[in-house]
Image: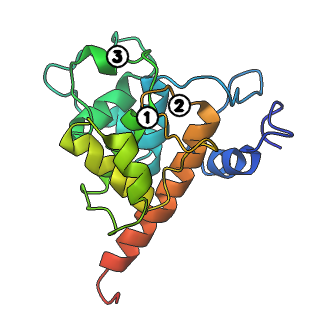
Amino acid sequence: LLFSDMNDHWARFTAGRLALRHLIQGYEDGTFQPDKRISKGEFAAMFARIFASTDQIVALPEVTGFDLCSKEHWARPYLNYMATLGLIPPADESWKADVPCTRLDAVLCMWKRAGQPAAATGVGASSADSATAGLEPQARASVEWALSQGILRGYPDGTLRLAEPVSRAETAEILSRYLVAYLASQTAQAPGAR
């Protein structure tokens, strides 16, 4: 195994696959710390690496008004990348680098990056109805889409816990599912695809 603390963890295979593709990283001590809450800076780094190399990310000019972390913060290029794509605001207290990332934050970014698609009709509707009541329209649409694509799944008690911070292991799992859904949608849109 790639991480010393993942031997019996439910997300060990997913984390290992993503690490081998250089999409996620562990800590210097060889651990992944799967149950640790992920920060928005960490999420931005994991998500950005799906679409661009670190060199490409670092080379991007800074978005006007960017104020999510100090100039020295390790996550600055990744947050700037996300802001450049319009996935997050360039200056917003709720998107500061060290703020915990919620399940809803992650899903909303994924939905925006996928082009804000509609959910497949009827899939995940009962889970979405109860979990998304009271959410803003974009947030509701992102959750419905994520459920319909199998990216977001509920907990054994039937809840989605959208406002709760997501763990590193959960993030790895959600990113893995997103990759499958995103690649499938790109293949379907390719010239000559049915």
In space, the residues marked 3 and 2 are separated at their CA atoms by 16 Å
Q: Quadrant location of the N terminus?
A: top right
Q: Looking at the picture, which amino acid does disc 1 mark?
A: Leu
Residue type indicated by callout 2: Val
| Count of numbered circles on the image | 3
Local SS, label 3? loop
Alpha-carbon span between mark 1 and mark 2: 9 Å
Please state the horizontal and vertical placement of residue 17, each as a whole percent of the image. Answer: 68, 52
Give residue 162's mark: 1
Spatial separation of the CA atoms under disc 3 and disc 1: 19 Å
In which quadrant of the rendered view does residue 155 lie?
top right
Q: Who comes first in sequence, dot 3 or dot 2?
A: 3
Q: Is 126 on the left or on the right of 60, as rendered?
A: right
Say if 72 sits above or below 138 in the image. above
From the viewer's perspective, is residue 36 above or below residue 122? Answer: above
Q: Which residue is mark 2?
A: 166
Q: Position of residue 19 (x, y in %)?
A: 65, 44
The residue located at (21%, 19%) in the rendering is 91
Q: Which residue position holds label 3?
A: 96
Height in image: 56 above or below 113? above
Disc 2 secondary structure class: loop
